[in-house]
Image: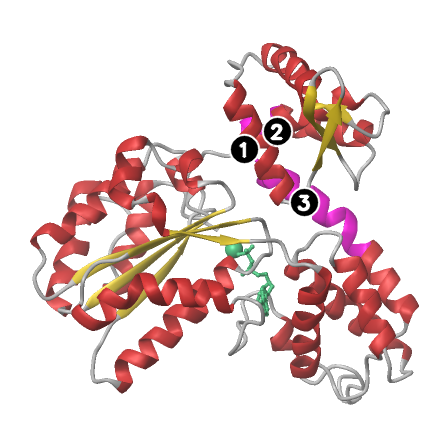
Amino acid sequence: MFDRSSVIIRDSSKLMYDYVPQVLPHREDQMKGLERLFRPMVTNGQPCSAFLYGGVGTGKTATAKRFCEDMTKYCASNSKQMDSLLINCRIKNTEHSALLQMVRHFDPGYPERGFSAEEMFRSFRAHIEKRSRPFVLILDEVDNLLKNNSENIIYKLTRINEDLKASSISIIMISQFSIADVLDEASMSTFKRANTIVFERYTAPFLRDILKQRIDEALLPDTVGEEELDLMTEIGSQFGDARFGIEIIEKSAMIAEEEETGRITADNIRTAGAMIYSGVSESKLKELDLNHKLALLAVSRALKGNAFVNINAAEKTYAIVCEEYGQAARKHTQFWSYIRDMERNGILATELRSEIETGRVTFITIPDIPPKELAKKLEYLLELPQLTDDVEW
Ligand SMILES: Nc1ncnc2c1ncn2[C@@H]1O[C@H](COP(=O)(O)OP(=O)(O)O)[C@@H](O)[C@H]1O
Ligand SMILES: [Mg+2]
Protein backbone atom coordinates (compact mmCIF):
# COMPACT_ATOMS: atom_id res chain seq x y z
CA MET A 1 0.00 0.00 0.00
CA PHE A 2 2.91 2.42 0.61
CA ASP A 3 5.00 1.34 -2.33
CA ARG A 4 3.33 3.45 -5.01
CA SER A 5 5.88 6.02 -6.04
CA SER A 6 4.92 9.64 -5.83
CA VAL A 7 4.11 11.57 -9.02
CA ILE A 8 4.04 15.12 -7.66
CA ILE A 9 5.99 15.46 -4.43
CA ARG A 10 9.76 15.03 -4.49
CA ASP A 11 10.58 16.02 -0.90
CA SER A 12 7.74 16.81 1.49
CA SER A 13 10.12 18.02 4.23
CA LYS A 14 10.67 21.14 2.11
CA LEU A 15 7.03 22.06 2.71
CA MET A 16 7.18 21.69 6.49
CA TYR A 17 6.54 24.83 8.53
CA ASP A 18 10.01 24.83 10.10
CA TYR A 19 12.05 24.28 6.93
CA VAL A 20 14.18 27.30 6.05
CA PRO A 21 15.53 27.57 2.48
CA GLN A 22 19.18 28.52 1.93
CA VAL A 23 18.13 31.81 0.36
CA LEU A 24 15.00 33.82 1.22
CA PRO A 25 13.84 35.76 -1.84
CA HIS A 26 12.87 39.39 -1.15
CA ARG A 27 14.29 39.41 2.34
CA GLU A 28 17.72 40.63 1.20
CA ASP A 29 17.20 44.07 2.80
CA GLN A 30 16.21 42.56 6.12
CA MET A 31 19.23 40.23 6.04
CA LYS A 32 21.48 43.19 5.25
CA GLY A 33 19.89 45.17 8.09
CA LEU A 34 20.64 42.34 10.51
CA GLU A 35 24.17 42.11 9.18
CA ARG A 36 24.67 45.81 9.82
CA LEU A 37 23.29 45.56 13.37
CA PHE A 38 25.37 42.48 14.25
CA ARG A 39 28.68 43.53 12.75
CA PRO A 40 30.03 44.68 16.18
CA MET A 41 29.26 41.25 17.59
CA VAL A 42 30.96 39.35 14.80
CA THR A 43 34.05 41.56 14.72
CA ASN A 44 34.52 42.43 18.40
CA GLY A 45 32.15 40.21 20.35
CA GLN A 46 30.05 43.21 21.43
CA PRO A 47 26.39 42.71 22.41
CA CYS A 48 23.90 43.77 19.70
CA SER A 49 20.13 43.86 19.37
CA ALA A 50 17.37 43.88 16.77
CA PHE A 51 13.60 44.06 16.78
CA LEU A 52 11.88 42.31 13.85
CA TYR A 53 8.40 43.64 13.23
CA GLY A 54 5.71 42.60 10.72
CA GLY A 55 2.54 40.61 10.08
CA VAL A 56 2.06 36.85 10.19
CA GLY A 57 3.83 34.87 7.47
CA THR A 58 6.12 37.70 6.36
CA GLY A 59 9.24 35.61 7.01
CA LYS A 60 10.36 37.01 10.38
CA THR A 61 11.12 33.66 12.00
CA ALA A 62 12.64 32.22 8.83
CA THR A 63 14.90 35.28 8.36
CA ALA A 64 16.08 35.23 11.99
CA LYS A 65 16.92 31.52 11.72
CA ARG A 66 18.65 31.85 8.36
CA PHE A 67 20.61 34.86 9.61
CA CYS A 68 21.84 33.08 12.76
CA GLU A 69 22.79 29.96 10.82
CA ASP A 70 24.69 31.95 8.19
CA MET A 71 26.38 34.09 10.84
CA THR A 72 27.44 30.97 12.80
CA LYS A 73 28.96 29.52 9.62
CA TYR A 74 30.71 32.78 8.84
CA CYS A 75 32.18 32.92 12.33
CA ALA A 76 33.33 29.30 12.14
CA SER A 77 35.08 29.93 8.84
CA ASN A 78 36.93 32.80 10.51
CA SER A 79 37.93 30.68 13.51
CA LYS A 80 35.41 32.38 15.77
CA GLN A 81 32.67 30.75 17.72
CA MET A 82 29.18 31.87 18.58
CA ASP A 83 26.04 30.26 19.87
CA SER A 84 22.33 30.95 19.38
CA LEU A 85 18.96 29.83 20.69
CA LEU A 86 15.41 30.52 19.53
CA ILE A 87 12.61 30.63 22.08
CA ASN A 88 9.05 30.51 20.82
CA CYS A 89 7.36 32.73 23.39
CA ARG A 90 3.91 31.72 22.26
CA ILE A 91 4.71 28.40 23.94
CA LYS A 92 7.23 29.56 26.54
CA ASN A 93 5.08 32.47 27.61
CA THR A 94 6.21 32.83 31.23
CA GLU A 95 9.51 33.90 32.69
CA HIS A 96 9.93 30.45 34.24
CA SER A 97 9.36 28.46 31.06
CA ALA A 98 11.58 30.77 28.98
CA LEU A 99 14.39 30.64 31.54
CA LEU A 100 14.05 26.88 31.76
CA GLN A 101 14.61 26.53 28.01
CA MET A 102 17.59 28.90 28.22
CA VAL A 103 19.28 26.92 31.01
CA ARG A 104 18.45 23.59 29.40
CA HIS A 105 20.18 24.71 26.23
CA PHE A 106 23.42 24.22 28.18
CA ASP A 107 22.25 21.68 30.75
CA PRO A 108 19.50 19.43 29.31
CA GLY A 109 18.90 17.67 32.62
CA TYR A 110 18.11 20.86 34.57
CA PRO A 111 15.05 20.11 36.73
CA GLU A 112 11.77 21.74 35.90
CA ARG A 113 10.83 22.66 39.45
CA GLY A 114 12.69 23.63 42.58
CA PHE A 115 14.66 26.68 41.43
CA SER A 116 13.67 30.32 41.60
CA ALA A 117 13.88 32.62 38.59
CA GLU A 118 16.87 34.27 40.24
CA GLU A 119 18.72 30.95 40.54
CA MET A 120 17.91 29.96 36.98
CA PHE A 121 19.15 33.30 35.78
CA ARG A 122 22.39 32.83 37.65
CA SER A 123 22.93 29.35 36.14
CA PHE A 124 22.28 30.71 32.65
CA ARG A 125 24.75 33.51 33.24
CA ALA A 126 27.40 31.13 34.53
CA HIS A 127 27.07 28.99 31.39
CA ILE A 128 27.37 32.04 29.15
CA GLU A 129 30.42 33.24 31.04
CA LYS A 130 32.12 29.85 30.94
CA ARG A 131 31.69 29.43 27.17
CA SER A 132 33.51 32.67 26.35
CA ARG A 133 31.73 33.42 23.12
CA PRO A 134 28.89 35.63 21.89
CA PHE A 135 25.41 34.25 22.44
CA VAL A 136 22.36 35.30 20.39
CA LEU A 137 18.96 34.83 21.99
CA ILE A 138 15.99 35.01 19.62
CA LEU A 139 12.74 35.74 21.46
CA ASP A 140 10.12 34.92 18.84
CA GLU A 141 6.58 36.32 19.31
CA VAL A 142 7.98 38.10 22.34
CA ASP A 143 4.71 39.94 23.09
CA ASN A 144 3.36 36.71 24.59
CA LEU A 145 6.16 36.70 27.14
CA LEU A 146 6.12 40.41 27.98
CA LYS A 147 2.37 40.43 28.40
CA ASN A 148 2.87 38.19 31.42
CA ASN A 149 4.91 40.82 33.26
CA SER A 150 8.26 39.44 32.26
CA GLU A 151 9.54 42.79 31.06
CA ASN A 152 12.44 42.78 33.39
CA ILE A 153 13.75 39.61 31.76
CA ILE A 154 14.81 41.83 28.85
CA TYR A 155 16.26 44.37 31.21
CA LYS A 156 18.11 41.70 33.20
CA LEU A 157 19.45 40.07 30.05
CA THR A 158 20.87 43.31 28.68
CA ARG A 159 22.36 44.16 32.08
CA ILE A 160 24.28 40.86 32.22
CA ASN A 161 26.56 42.27 29.54
CA GLU A 162 27.90 44.94 31.85
CA ASP A 163 30.14 42.51 33.67
CA LEU A 164 30.77 39.83 31.08
CA LYS A 165 34.27 39.73 29.65
CA ALA A 166 34.86 37.22 26.88
CA SER A 167 31.13 36.56 26.33
CA SER A 168 28.14 38.69 25.42
CA ILE A 169 24.40 38.29 25.05
CA SER A 170 22.71 39.73 21.98
CA ILE A 171 18.94 39.71 21.60
CA ILE A 172 16.70 39.49 18.57
CA MET A 173 13.08 40.14 19.48
CA ILE A 174 10.34 39.27 17.01
CA SER A 175 6.75 40.49 17.10
CA GLN A 176 3.77 41.24 14.94
CA PHE A 177 3.15 44.24 17.20
CA SER A 178 5.24 47.40 17.21
CA ILE A 179 8.06 47.91 19.68
CA ALA A 180 6.11 50.65 21.48
CA ASP A 181 3.23 48.24 22.08
CA VAL A 182 5.53 45.52 23.31
CA LEU A 183 8.11 47.24 25.51
CA ASP A 184 7.74 49.79 28.31
CA GLU A 185 9.65 53.08 28.06
CA ALA A 186 12.56 51.92 30.23
CA SER A 187 13.22 48.71 28.28
CA MET A 188 12.69 50.54 25.02
CA SER A 189 15.48 52.99 25.78
CA THR A 190 17.93 50.18 26.59
CA PHE A 191 16.81 48.39 23.46
CA LYS A 192 16.95 51.35 21.05
CA ARG A 193 14.07 51.99 18.72
CA ALA A 194 16.44 52.40 15.80
CA ASN A 195 17.15 48.70 15.73
CA THR A 196 13.74 47.85 14.29
CA ILE A 197 13.66 45.92 11.02
CA VAL A 198 10.30 46.01 9.27
CA PHE A 199 8.83 43.04 7.38
CA GLU A 200 6.24 44.26 4.88
CA ARG A 201 3.55 41.97 3.57
CA TYR A 202 4.58 40.29 0.33
CA THR A 203 3.20 41.71 -2.89
CA ALA A 204 1.90 39.25 -5.47
CA PRO A 205 5.12 39.20 -7.61
CA PHE A 206 7.24 38.64 -4.47
CA LEU A 207 5.02 35.85 -3.28
CA ARG A 208 5.19 34.26 -6.73
CA ASP A 209 8.98 34.07 -6.50
CA ILE A 210 8.80 32.50 -3.04
CA LEU A 211 6.28 29.90 -4.18
CA LYS A 212 8.27 29.16 -7.33
CA GLN A 213 11.39 28.49 -5.25
CA ARG A 214 9.48 26.16 -2.94
CA ILE A 215 7.85 24.29 -5.81
CA ASP A 216 11.26 23.71 -7.41
CA GLU A 217 12.64 22.33 -4.17
CA ALA A 218 9.70 20.24 -3.02
CA LEU A 219 7.92 18.99 -6.15
CA LEU A 220 8.94 16.98 -9.18
CA PRO A 221 9.70 18.92 -12.40
CA ASP A 222 6.81 20.05 -14.62
CA THR A 223 4.09 19.39 -12.07
CA VAL A 224 2.97 23.03 -11.83
CA GLY A 225 2.32 25.15 -14.94
CA GLU A 226 2.80 28.92 -15.15
CA GLU A 227 -0.94 29.59 -14.98
CA GLU A 228 -1.34 27.31 -12.02
CA LEU A 229 1.46 29.17 -10.26
CA ASP A 230 -0.35 32.43 -11.02
CA LEU A 231 -3.50 31.05 -9.45
CA MET A 232 -1.65 29.94 -6.30
CA THR A 233 -0.12 33.41 -6.12
CA GLU A 234 -3.46 35.11 -6.54
CA ILE A 235 -5.09 33.13 -3.77
CA GLY A 236 -2.05 33.40 -1.51
CA SER A 237 -1.52 37.12 -1.99
CA GLN A 238 -4.92 37.98 -0.59
CA PHE A 239 -3.10 37.56 2.69
CA GLY A 240 0.45 38.56 1.71
CA ASP A 241 1.31 35.56 3.83
CA ALA A 242 3.95 33.09 2.63
CA ARG A 243 2.85 30.44 5.09
CA PHE A 244 -0.60 30.36 3.53
CA GLY A 245 0.90 30.16 0.03
CA ILE A 246 3.14 27.25 0.99
CA GLU A 247 0.18 25.46 2.54
CA ILE A 248 -1.62 25.82 -0.78
CA ILE A 249 1.30 24.12 -2.54
CA GLU A 250 1.26 21.32 0.00
CA LYS A 251 -2.50 20.69 0.03
CA SER A 252 -2.95 20.95 -3.74
CA ALA A 253 0.02 18.61 -4.26
CA MET A 254 -1.56 16.07 -1.93
CA ILE A 255 -4.87 16.29 -3.77
CA ALA A 256 -3.14 15.97 -7.16
CA GLU A 257 -1.11 13.02 -5.91
CA GLU A 258 -4.36 11.11 -5.35
CA GLU A 259 -5.63 11.88 -8.85
CA GLU A 260 -2.53 10.52 -10.56
CA THR A 261 -2.65 12.98 -13.45
CA GLY A 262 0.94 13.95 -12.73
CA ARG A 263 0.13 17.67 -12.59
CA ILE A 264 -1.50 20.08 -10.17
CA THR A 265 -4.67 21.43 -11.79
CA ALA A 266 -6.44 24.73 -11.20
CA ASP A 267 -9.25 22.88 -9.46
CA ASN A 268 -6.81 21.16 -7.10
CA ILE A 269 -5.56 24.61 -6.13
CA ARG A 270 -9.05 26.03 -5.62
CA THR A 271 -10.01 23.09 -3.43
CA ALA A 272 -6.82 23.49 -1.41
CA GLY A 273 -7.42 27.24 -1.01
CA ALA A 274 -10.96 26.72 0.23
CA MET A 275 -9.81 24.03 2.68
CA ILE A 276 -7.20 26.29 4.24
CA TYR A 277 -9.06 29.60 4.09
CA SER A 278 -11.40 29.18 7.05
CA GLY A 279 -8.56 27.82 9.16
CA VAL A 280 -6.38 30.82 8.43
CA SER A 281 -8.86 33.43 9.48
CA GLU A 282 -9.63 31.53 12.66
CA SER A 283 -6.00 31.11 13.63
CA LYS A 284 -5.28 34.79 12.99
CA LEU A 285 -8.12 35.77 15.31
CA LYS A 286 -6.90 33.48 18.04
CA GLU A 287 -3.50 35.14 17.91
CA LEU A 288 -4.94 38.54 18.79
CA ASP A 289 -4.72 39.68 22.38
CA LEU A 290 -7.71 40.98 24.34
CA ASN A 291 -7.28 44.62 23.30
CA HIS A 292 -7.02 43.82 19.61
CA LYS A 293 -10.02 41.50 19.80
CA LEU A 294 -12.13 44.24 21.39
CA ALA A 295 -11.07 46.77 18.76
CA LEU A 296 -11.86 44.32 15.96
CA LEU A 297 -15.23 43.47 17.47
CA ALA A 298 -15.98 47.20 17.54
CA VAL A 299 -15.06 47.58 13.86
CA SER A 300 -17.13 44.59 12.80
CA ARG A 301 -20.16 45.87 14.72
CA ALA A 302 -19.72 49.44 13.48
CA LEU A 303 -19.67 48.28 9.85
CA LYS A 304 -23.37 47.28 10.16
CA GLY A 305 -23.50 45.71 6.73
CA ASN A 306 -21.71 48.65 5.04
CA ALA A 307 -18.51 48.13 3.10
CA PHE A 308 -16.58 50.82 4.99
CA VAL A 309 -16.82 52.58 8.33
CA ASN A 310 -15.29 55.89 9.42
CA ILE A 311 -12.58 55.26 12.02
CA ASN A 312 -14.12 57.80 14.39
CA ALA A 313 -17.43 55.95 14.33
CA ALA A 314 -15.57 52.70 14.98
CA GLU A 315 -13.84 54.27 17.96
CA LYS A 316 -17.18 55.26 19.48
CA THR A 317 -18.38 51.67 19.16
CA TYR A 318 -15.07 50.58 20.70
CA ALA A 319 -15.86 52.51 23.91
CA ILE A 320 -19.20 50.71 24.14
CA VAL A 321 -17.65 47.30 23.49
CA CYS A 322 -15.01 47.87 26.18
CA GLU A 323 -17.68 48.78 28.68
CA GLU A 324 -19.64 45.66 27.79
CA TYR A 325 -16.59 43.49 28.52
CA GLY A 326 -15.62 45.40 31.67
CA GLN A 327 -12.37 46.71 30.18
CA ALA A 328 -11.04 50.26 30.20
CA ALA A 329 -11.08 51.66 26.66
CA ARG A 330 -7.55 52.56 25.55
CA LYS A 331 -6.63 56.01 24.29
CA HIS A 332 -7.18 57.26 20.77
CA THR A 333 -3.56 56.64 19.66
CA GLN A 334 -3.66 53.14 21.07
CA PHE A 335 -6.88 52.34 19.22
CA TRP A 336 -5.21 53.55 16.03
CA SER A 337 -2.22 51.34 16.63
CA TYR A 338 -4.53 48.31 17.05
CA ILE A 339 -6.11 49.10 13.69
CA ARG A 340 -2.67 49.45 12.08
CA ASP A 341 -1.47 46.15 13.58
CA MET A 342 -4.51 44.33 12.23
CA GLU A 343 -4.06 45.93 8.85
CA ARG A 344 -0.51 44.59 8.74
CA ASN A 345 -1.90 41.23 9.62
CA GLY A 346 -4.31 41.30 6.71
CA ILE A 347 -7.37 41.10 8.96
CA LEU A 348 -8.68 44.50 7.94
CA ALA A 349 -7.82 47.22 5.45
CA THR A 350 -7.95 51.02 5.62
CA GLU A 351 -8.43 53.72 3.05
CA LEU A 352 -7.80 57.45 3.33
CA ARG A 353 -10.63 59.56 1.91
CA SER A 354 -10.88 63.29 1.43
CA GLU A 355 -14.14 64.80 2.57
CA ILE A 356 -15.07 68.37 1.90
CA GLU A 357 -16.17 69.23 5.44
CA THR A 358 -13.77 67.25 7.58
CA GLY A 359 -10.68 66.86 5.41
CA ARG A 360 -8.91 63.52 5.22
CA VAL A 361 -10.52 60.67 7.12
CA THR A 362 -9.53 57.02 7.50
CA PHE A 363 -12.12 54.42 6.60
CA ILE A 364 -11.88 50.78 7.63
CA THR A 365 -13.10 47.68 5.85
CA ILE A 366 -12.93 43.94 6.49
CA PRO A 367 -12.33 42.27 3.14
CA ASP A 368 -12.35 38.55 3.85
CA ILE A 369 -15.13 37.65 6.29
CA PRO A 370 -18.67 39.01 6.52
CA PRO A 371 -18.52 41.39 9.54
CA LYS A 372 -21.49 39.71 11.21
CA GLU A 373 -19.73 36.34 11.09
CA LEU A 374 -16.57 37.93 12.38
CA ALA A 375 -18.40 39.56 15.29
CA LYS A 376 -19.89 36.19 16.23
CA LYS A 377 -16.50 34.48 16.17
CA LEU A 378 -14.96 37.23 18.28
CA GLU A 379 -17.77 37.15 20.81
CA TYR A 380 -17.20 33.43 21.11
CA LEU A 381 -13.43 33.84 21.52
CA LEU A 382 -13.91 36.59 24.09
CA GLU A 383 -16.06 34.27 26.19
CA LEU A 384 -13.16 31.81 26.45
CA PRO A 385 -10.59 32.35 29.20
CA GLN A 386 -7.74 34.42 27.76
CA LEU A 387 -4.54 32.37 27.43
CA THR A 388 -2.15 33.35 30.17
CA ASP A 389 -1.45 30.06 31.95
CA ASP A 390 1.84 28.26 32.03
CA VAL A 391 1.21 25.45 29.56
CA GLU A 392 4.00 23.60 27.87
CA TRP A 393 3.27 21.75 24.69
N1 LIG B 1 11.18 35.24 1.63
C1 LIG B 1 10.88 33.96 1.81
N2 LIG B 1 11.41 33.00 1.05
C2 LIG B 1 11.13 31.70 1.24
N3 LIG B 1 10.28 31.25 2.17
C3 LIG B 1 9.69 32.16 2.97
C4 LIG B 1 9.96 33.55 2.84
N4 LIG B 1 9.23 34.21 3.76
C5 LIG B 1 8.54 33.29 4.44
N5 LIG B 1 8.81 32.05 3.98
C6 LIG B 1 8.23 30.80 4.45
O1 LIG B 1 6.88 31.06 4.81
C7 LIG B 1 6.56 30.47 6.06
C8 LIG B 1 6.19 31.54 7.05
O2 LIG B 1 7.32 32.32 7.36
P1 LIG B 1 7.69 32.70 8.87
O3 LIG B 1 9.12 33.08 8.90
O4 LIG B 1 7.25 31.62 9.78
O5 LIG B 1 6.76 33.98 9.04
P2 LIG B 1 6.50 34.85 10.35
O6 LIG B 1 7.49 34.40 11.39
O7 LIG B 1 6.72 36.26 9.90
O8 LIG B 1 5.08 34.59 10.72
C9 LIG B 1 7.77 29.65 6.46
O9 LIG B 1 7.57 28.33 6.02
C10 LIG B 1 8.91 30.30 5.73
O10 LIG B 1 9.94 29.38 5.43
MG1 LIG C 1 7.09 33.51 13.20
For the question of whether residue 235 can be seen, the reply is yes
Which residue has dot 2 on it? 293
Q: Secondary structure at mark 2?
A: helix
Using residue 221 as the reference point, say whether residue 360 is left or right of it: left
Mark number displayed over residue 346: 3
At 71% from the left and 63% from the top, the residue drawn is 245
Q: Please tell me whether mark 1 or mark 3 is closer to you in this view.
A: 3
State the extent of the magenta-drawn residues as a range. Answer: 275-294
Question: What x and y, as percent, mark residue 285?
Answer: 65, 38
Question: What x and y, as percent, mark residue 187?
Answer: 28, 38
Which residue has dot 1 on it? 289
Closest to the observer: 244 or 226?
226
Which quadrant: the N terminus?
bottom right
Question: What x and y, as percent, mark residue 214?
Answer: 66, 76
For the question of whether residue 246 can be seen, the reply is no
* Secondary structure character of the magenta stretch overall: helix
On screen, residue 328 above or below 186:
above
